[in-house]
Structure formats: C-alpha cells, structure tokens
Image (cartoon, rainbow, N blue to C red):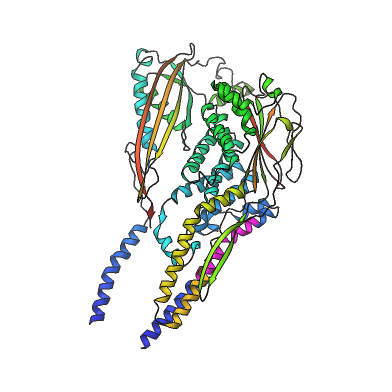
Amino acid sequence: MCRNFFSKIVFWVSMPLIMSLMIGCTATTRDISPDETIHYDESYDFSDKNAIVNDLVESLVNKPPLVARFDRPVIIIYGVANRTSEHIETSGITDDIRQEILESGKARFVSKRQRDDIAAETDYQYGGNVSAETRLQRARQVGAEYMLTGTLRSIKKKEPKQVRLRKKTLQYYSLTLELTDLQTGLIEWTDSAEIVREASKPFIGW
Amino acid sequence: MVNIASSVHKLKSACLLLCLLSIAVSGCASGKLTRARDAFYGGQPEQAAAVLSVPEDVSSRDRLLYFMEKGAILHHNGDYQGSTDNLLRAAALMREQDIISAGQQTASLVTNEWLTDYKGEYAERLLVHTYLMMNFLMLGNHESALVEAKQALEVYDDTCPEACANDFFTRALIAHCFEALNEINGAYIEYKNLAELMPDPSPVARKLYDLANRLGFDDDAERFSKFLSESELNRRKRPAGEVIVFAGQGRSPVKIPHNIVVPPSIRFSFYTYDDRSPYLPPPSVGPLAGSADIVTTDVGEILKASLKERLARILVKETARVVAKEAIANNIDNDGLEILIRIFFFLTEVPDTRCWQTLPAYFSMIRVPLPPEAGPIRIKGLGQTVTLPEIDTGAGNGSFYHYYSIRNGMGPVYGAGP
C-alpha cells in the first residue's frame, strides 16, 4: 500500500519534470519584425544599426546642405571605419544609409564598389561584340559632389572585480558621419548617433 | 535481504561502469588532438590539419583546444583565412565559457577536471588574439587586426595583467595594429606601455622617437633619442616601407602530471609545465642587421606565469575534491563497496594536462625598414637561413608593410604585401 503510494508520487513528480525537459530540448523558431528592438547582450546588433541609421539619415536630409537642394546632388560613400572592439560589417550601415537617402529623394549616388565592374563592362562593350548603336558612351559618368564618410566607435566599461553573482557591462557606441564637399574640402554636415547600454550576465549557470 | 544484496551489486556495477567510462572518455577526448600534434611536429602539417576535419572529432569539453590547435596549424600552413575562421570560433567559445557551469563543477568534485570544459590558460586565451592579429595582417585586413588588438587589450586588463606582462610580442603587435591604421595616439600609448615593460626598450625606441615627434611630445622624443645611433637621428626621413616578420621557434612547454599519494587511498594530483625546447636565441637579420628591431616573447615563461597565477584556485579545488571524495567514501557502511569506491576515486584522480601544444616556444617580431636600395633580406637562426622574396621598395604612397610568417623547420615562407 505504502509502496504503491510512493511509486505514484515518484511518477507524478518525475513526469512533469521529464516533460518540461523534453519541451526545453525542442528546437523552436519564430519570425520577428526587422523593426522590433531585440538585444541579447550589450554588443552591437541589427536593432542598433536600424536606430543609428534612422537618426542620422533624418538629420542628413533635413539639414543643410541637402535640405536646401532640390537638384539631387550626387554623393559617393567612402565607407564607415570600424574602430570598435568587435568585428562589425560596416558596409551594412552604408548600404542602409544609401537606401534611405535614395528613398527620401534628396540625393543620388555613384558607386565606388562597382567601379571596376563598370570599367570591365565598358571594355567588354568596346571589345567588338556589342553593336555601335547600343553600346554605352565613354566619359558620360557623373562626378560626385559630396563624399560621405564615418567612424563607428565603442567604449566598454566593466564593473570592477568584487564578490557578486552577476557581472555588469556598460557599452557605448557612437557613429559619426561627415558630408564633405569634394570641390572645397569643407565638411558641410556632420552628426552622430549614440547608444549606451548596460547588460548583466550571471557568473554561474547550469 | 536479497533486495539489499541486489542493490549493492547494482551499485558496484554502476561504479565500475562509471570508472571505465571516465577513463575511456579521458582517452577518446584527446585521441585526434594527439594525432594532429604528432603529425604537425612530424613535419606533416597538411595531414595534421586533415586529422582535425570537423569540431565533432573531439569531445565537446575539448572544443576550445580543437579550435586553438587547428587555428595554429592552419596559420603555419599558410591558410590564414582558415586559421582565422577557427580562432574566431575559439574566441567566441571563450566568451561563452565565462559562465561557470555548476553541473560540471559538481561532477568534477567527485571525478576530475577532465569532465569540465577546457577554458585555456590566461596566456593561451591571449595568444588566440595574437594569432588572429597576425592572420588579419597577413590577409591585409588592418581594420580587423585592430579589432583583435582591442580584444587582446581587454584580455590583458581583465585576465592576466601580471602573468602576460612579458608577452612583448603581442604588445608589439597591438601597437603595430594601431600604427598601421594611422591611429598614432593609440600606437604611441601601446609602444610606450611596451617600453616600460621591457628590460631594454631599444627595439621600440625608433618607433617611439618618430611617433613622439609626430605628436609634438618633445620631452619624450628626447628621452627615446638616447637609444638611437647618430646616423638614425640624422636621417631626415625614414623609409616608408617596412618588412615585418612573425617568427616562431621551437615547441612550447606542455603540462605533465604529478601525484602525491597519502596511504591508504588519498591521491593528490597536480601538473606543471615541462619545457620541450632548449633556449633558442632570437633570430638575426642580414645584411640590414643594424636597422632591424626584434621583439621576442618566451611563450613558456608566460604560460608558466599564467599557471602560477591560478595556483591558489587550483589548490583550493584539488583540496575540496580530496575532502569530498574522503567524505563520500567514509560514509559508506558496506566495506566492500567502500573499497570499490575508493579505488574508483583513486583511479579517476587524474591531473588535467590539457594544453595548447602547437604553440612555438618563442615568438619574435622582426621589423626591417626598407630603404630603396634594399637587397634580399635574410633571417638567420630559425634552424636555417631564410631569404625573403625581393620586394619592390617603391610601392605605395605613405607607409606600407610586407608581412611574413615563418616557423622554424615548418615549410615555406608565406608573405603578404600592401
């Protein structure tokens, strides 16, 4: 009688435990919106990229010189230098900036990245395989009026060593963009977006 | 009565099985790593890389060692991208392993440290970033090299400010990563930190003198000018190009086990580093010997210092394990079972001798300014004289660097230009 009762208790205690373990081990996926803000830790992620790009593009298109220009000046992007302590693909930032400015209709771009491909295609068209009527004309490319450059920086601060169960980290990121007039060398616009985040993680896990 | 006898029998079987399993696991975990190391030092580095084809080849507890060993092997094979991929995974794993696993620590209290994830000695953790910096420089990716330099600085500050203080090679690499991207403030700070750590700052005096002049630090420029020759000081303009050689020599020390047995069954196990290479003098450069700067790290010295820094923690853990095992054995009423458990505890008390074994015994960074009339550069003292390929000294505007990585007696010289 007592033994039966004990067996039942063991069964009813262990079954939910086993079930919860099995559920925990099941792989799950879910779709999330790219606009949703999600941070797993203090490091730079796609939510930061979106926030930084939105802030800076808004400033760029709503301040001089672009706000006063209606002829869609041509810009060339020379990339964002990564001066953080993380491996961050900054071309993703410049791609998004270009896309948003193009969508705003305030400027146009020439592509530095595609120059070699354009030259190769031009050479091909003049190589004898393309008819004279349809091949492109040389020396018709548009020169850039402005150059867009930037620097992504970070400062990391950790809590001093002491007896505790969690350790906190303070992470600071800043992206500074500059728009330089290629003719005069003057910096016509500059702005920066900043992110400061505190994260903590436990010292002990299972 | 029958039930008790049956339970004891089952317990005995379980203990025996656990014992065998733990011994077997210790052996399996390092099997492929041992074969890869043997092939590497046996002059077959390609085969060494092939032995470690996928991370699943080794136990998950030795995964960090897998990435470290494979990263080093691929670097010395000239596959810098492959080496980078593996070492970036090692760096990511080190960050994940920051959290102490309560489960593994509890299990290791009644068995041994082989049941825990290998986390690397402090110096090994730093050397992951050292290799990554070299890889990115060899690949011409200065920006990523600087990212690694900053991560190496974090390891210095957080983990091993004292144990790794004599890793002059890594410090010089960090300073160079700043310098190569024209971050001269950062470069100056790092070269100055290095000069303060070195017994003789002559190998970095030239850099410090130039950078101090560029930054307008006249007092410092004068201070470092004392280390330079008259001809160096009178030179109006330094050559824009530099040859930078990363030279690895010998074989780093490995951990060897030691035991102290207190009868009847207490076994206290520990390990020390044992040298695998004799003292090797730093390489020399000809014919431009006078103008070359050489910074060397004794890898064995920083590994031993790292172990020494952890010594107190190792002793506490070892003592706790001995006490825990004794307490468990003493609380068993059945004499036969107690003897069996004591035998199990005695056999499983195996010191954790895991370590990164494909590291060289010495790392040297050789910098040779490239005057326009520079002929072929010869590096001596790597078991052979290595002649670097001729370089076009007129290449590039401003500063440019040609990088080479050499490991003594380990195949061809790999180079990368601007």
- Image check: B319 left or right of A12? right
Is residue B34 shown in magenta?
yes
Tell me which segment is drawn in magenta: B21-37
Q: Quadrant of the C terminus of chain B?
A: top right
Q: Is residue A158 above or below residue A139?
A: below
- Image check: A54 left or right of B80? left
Q: Residue at x 66, y 51 (%)?
A: B251
Is residue B180 shown in magenta?
no
Q: Is residue B45 above or below residue B228?
A: below
Residue B138 spot, x, y in % from top left: 61, 37
Q: Residue at x 70, y 27 (%)?
A: B370
Residue B209 spot, x, y in % from top left: 60, 25
Q: Is residue A91 visible?
A: yes
Q: Quadrant of the N terminus of chain B?
A: bottom left
- Image check: A92 left or right of B83? left
Q: Residue at x 31, y 63 (%)?
A: A19
Q: Is residue A71 above or below residue B249?
A: above
Q: Is residue B117 visible?
A: no
